[in-house]
Image: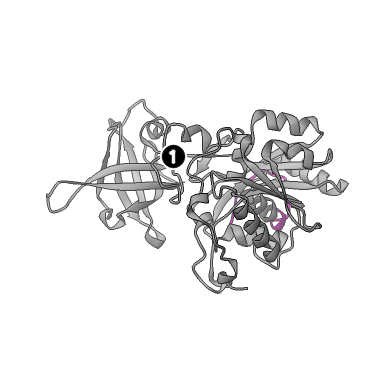
């Protein structure tokens, strides 16, 4: 298959710019791989499609306020220049200095040694070095050096929620809550595991009341996960590595579910990639952090995941390849065409699909 085989027509008006009024008010398209066509429901109806023996596994990563706006002094003395910085991943450093790998716009303005100032001067930055593929490493330092304000508290003050570029508006105060899942715990992502955004505490209670088990894994989502595949040959596309962890209690629960014949239902493509990467790493039970660059595309042997909940994804994206590997390209594109016809909302703040 080629990248062009995963195009579809989407009216721009169906790209969700805001979340639904309430999380579980999102629509739910149910795609049964053994039946003729999709069913249409509401996400709050999810428990009706689950079995008492099922096990849901969700990603508990938390999105950082990773988008920052600072200023650098131009070398020609013509004044400050605004730059946008997206924190990606913290790297080893000597405290109190905190070194982060970042993306920046314009990147050419951030050369080694350049100083950055921010609206809250409790911390400042200096370009430490150049990274791969246009990335930069920025060393952040507190001012003064023994300042009591932690980096995390400072970032919470000045950082913005990094909404995807297809959401064509600035982030708003409500996004700090709505672009997080209700089970978010481990801070480290620059994008939300969006299938989990539809869950409420009431939904989780209803799921558990039906006898469905619930467990979490962690995969910190980087920007590469959502990057469109630009190569026509899929073998040439490489995903950036992302850290993941399967806690010992989740590892034991998943093994027990597989041994008993229960369905393991992944909440989101990030949970799929975590569980399938964990399987390929030998299903360890040590709970250690590992990295994955797993690019799921057909043909693919799913060793753990039996069903999944997912949002509707961009054309030519690695996420669409993953869903198509699970349910079949033609069946998925037919479901997408049905969703367009029915006016479903697409992408991060959009509606959901359950594939069983």
Q: Position of residue 189 (x, y in %)?
A: 51, 44
Per the rendered image, the range of residues in magenta is 279-294
If the image is split into quadrants, where does the N terminus sit? bottom right
* Left or right of residue 52, residue 19 in this image: left
* Residue ID for mark 1: 161
Give me the residue at 73% from left, 53% from top.
38
Horizontal side, residue 309 vs residue 103: left or right: right
Q: Residues within 10 Å of mark 1 (few under 14, many from 20)?
A: many
Residue at 74% x, 46% y is 265
Q: Is residue 119 above or below residue 167?
A: above
**Secondary structure character of the magenta stretch overall:** loop
Query: Which residue is drawn at the image coordinates 54% and 67% (left, top)?
Result: 237
Front in this rendered view, residue 126 or 57: 57
Relative image position of residue 72 (x, y in whole percent): 23, 46
User: Which one is nearer the viewer's eye here, 22 or 271?
Assistant: 22
In the displayed orientation, state which residue is furthest to the front. Answer: 341
Q: Is residue 218 magenta?
A: no
Q: Quadrant of residue 161?
A: top left
Q: Is residue 104 visible?
A: yes
């Amino acid at each position: 298959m080629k990248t062009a085989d995963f195009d579809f027509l989407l009216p721009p008006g169906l790209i969700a710019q805001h979340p639904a009024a309430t999380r579980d008010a999102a629509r739910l398209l149910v795609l049964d791989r053994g039946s003729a066509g999709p069913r249409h429901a509401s996400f709050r109806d999810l428990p009706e499609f689950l079995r008492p023996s099922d096990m849901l596994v969700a990603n508990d990563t938390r999105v950082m306020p990773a988008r920052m706006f600072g200023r650098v002094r131009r070398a020609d003395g013509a004044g400050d220049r605004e730059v946008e910085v997206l924190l990606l991943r913290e790297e080893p450093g000597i405290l109190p200095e905190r070194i982060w790998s970042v993306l920046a716009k314009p990147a050419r303005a951030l050369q080694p040694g350049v100083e950055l100032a921010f609206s809250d001067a409790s911390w400042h930055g200096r370009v430490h070095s150049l990274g791969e593929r246009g990335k930069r490493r920025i060393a952040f330092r507190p001012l003064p050096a023994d300042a009591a304000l932690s980096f995390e508290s400072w970032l919470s003050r000045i950082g913005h929620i990094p909404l995807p570029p297809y959401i064509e508006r600035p982030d708003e105060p409500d996004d700090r809550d709505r672009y997080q899942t209700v089970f978010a715990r481990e801070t480290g992502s620059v994008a939300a595991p969006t299938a989990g955004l539809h869950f409420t505490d009431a939904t989780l209670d209803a799921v558990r009341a039906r006898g469905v088990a619930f467990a979490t894994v962690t995969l910190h989502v980087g920007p590469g996960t959502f990057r469109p595949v630009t190569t026509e040959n899929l073998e040439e596309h490489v995903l950036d590595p992302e850290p993941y962890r399967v806690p010992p209690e989740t590892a034991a629960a998943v093994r027990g579910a597989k041994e008993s014949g229960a369905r393991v239902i992944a909440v989101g493509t990030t949970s799929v990639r975590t569980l399938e990467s964990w399987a390929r790493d030998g299903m360890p039970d040590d709970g250690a952090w590992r990295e994955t660059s797993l690019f799921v595309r057909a043909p693919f042997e799913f060793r753990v995941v039996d069903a999944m909940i997912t949002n509707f994804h961009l054309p030519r994206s690695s996420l669409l390849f993953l869903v198509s590997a699970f349910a079949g390209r033609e069946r998925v594109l037919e479901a997408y065409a049905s969703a367009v016809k029915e006016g479903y909302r697409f992408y991060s703040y959009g509606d959901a699909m359950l594939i069983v």
